[in-house]
Image (cartoon, helix red, strand yellow):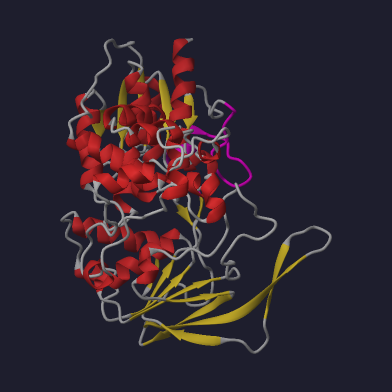
Amino acid sequence: MGNPKGFLTIHRKEAGNRPVDERKLDFTEVEQTLDTEDRVLQASRCMECGVPFCHWACPLGNVMPEWQDLVYKGNWKAAAEVLQRTNNFPEFTGRICPALCEKSCVLSLSNESVTIRENEAAVIERAFAEGFIKPNPPKFRTGKKVAVIGSGPSGLACADQLNKAGHTVTLFEKSDAVGGLLRYGIPDFKLNKYIIDRRLDILKAEGLEIKTNVYVGRDITAQELLDSYDAVCLAIGAMEPRDLQVEGREIEGVHFALDFLCQQNAILRGVHIPEESLISAKNKNVLVIGGGDTGSDCIGTSTRQGAKSLTQIEIMPKPPLSRTVDNPWPYYPFILKTSSSHEEGCTRKWSLNTKRFIAENGKLSGVEVVEVEWTKDPQTGRMGMIEVPGSNKVIKAELALLAMGFLHPVHLGLADELGLAYDRRGNISVSDKHQTSVEKVFAAGDAASGASLVVRALASGRETAKYVNEYLKK
């Protein structure tokens, strides 16, 4: 512990975001950075607790106290090495992770948790700037061939780990570029895509083979896959969106959130979108249905496209501002979250259920909603919803974006062709070693767990790689 009194004498200091009036005009990353001196001071606040709850809360098992201490002592290279022992891509999590670790930091009891996520981003950026991150190909090859399908965070982590183990790994991606939702789902103002490309250059130099524009299950059959590789890992995500089957769903102007976000990212990548296929918020009243991170990303993107007004609705009640008695520290706090996109201008409403979409001249003109009340069944403990009589109202909207989450991986195509078993939620059923019902086929990330966080996908990819490696050694 470098500074035993750091947490007493130095307060939490965040880097903060660029000014709203400036950042809403472009897609450049919103978050700023602290200078080296301030960052070292923030790292010095880590108490190296006897029980490091930050480490307990992190799905990757990052050992925060160790690399915080190294940052305080100015040993950035060692800090980066310790960080990368458990995290393949700190440059991703350092930008977009909800920082489960910080919520479980002992100092969060006084709302002064260590700035772990920002420190993480600073460490890996310093490592790249100083040239500490260099290709390190495996010294030998095992002769085993592995196919990883899907290049999102779980697929990238799994492929990286297996390549490091000396196997010959081919990473397949159906899109024109690697990254999955990191590339096409998360807006540039949260994750600049250069960050992905920079890491890909390292992975390719280490021998990872990458094939884009290859739709496995269509361009390559399931049987060809099984015949050509010693093991297969499916990291295809949970891409089946939750739909809203109400009157008027087919009206022009109602779209899935991910279609909207992917299209904007494609435009920034230089892809031409035909006018008739363009989903634009410009000069429109936009309604985002769904209160999670995807909905927030739609808000930020719509702001930058020039929306006339922005409203976000959620069917669940408004979360509390602070922890409730049944949600104690060190567990993750289920409280109201206000993102940088919300700060840029947005009306938020809760406990509203969507009843129908309304058209005018064949295009969306409004959305009818009704207020709902939630009650708990005293016998089962389950929450139930009832509509409030006479509370119906119409929200004016020319663009409605459905951001209600995802159900499970897409079954049609590769998964069905392989004859995989699914669990009751429709996810790919796996054993405790991430193996599917088909021999030598494994599943990682959201495909097996359902939609979750990037940090959990990375952890799943690493763990799946461990079990694939064990399988191949047999």
Q: Is residue 415 magenta?
A: yes
User: Is residue 237 among what the camera can see?
Assistant: no
Residue 321: percent from left, percent from top? 56, 67
Which SS does the magenta portion mostly show?
loop
Q: Is residue 371 magenta?
A: no
148 sits to left or right of 331: left
User: Residue sitting at 57 percent across and 46 percent down?
Assistant: 426
Image height check: is 213 above or below 407?
above
Snapshot quadrant of residue 180:
top left
User: Residue sitting at 34 percent across and 45 percent down?
Assistant: 41
**Depth check: 57 or 313 in front?**
57
**Depth check: 276 or 189 in front?**
189
* Residue positioned most to the right: 379
Image height check: is 85 above or below 322?
above
Image height check: is 469 above or below 80?
above
User: Residue sitting at 43 percent across and 49 percent down?
Assistant: 9
Residue 290: percent from left, percent from top? 49, 66
54 sits to left or right of 391: left
* Residue positioned most to the bottom: 390
Image height check: is 34 above or below 348?
above
Q: Quadrant of the N terminus?
A: top left
Query: What residue range appears in magenta?
Result: 408-432
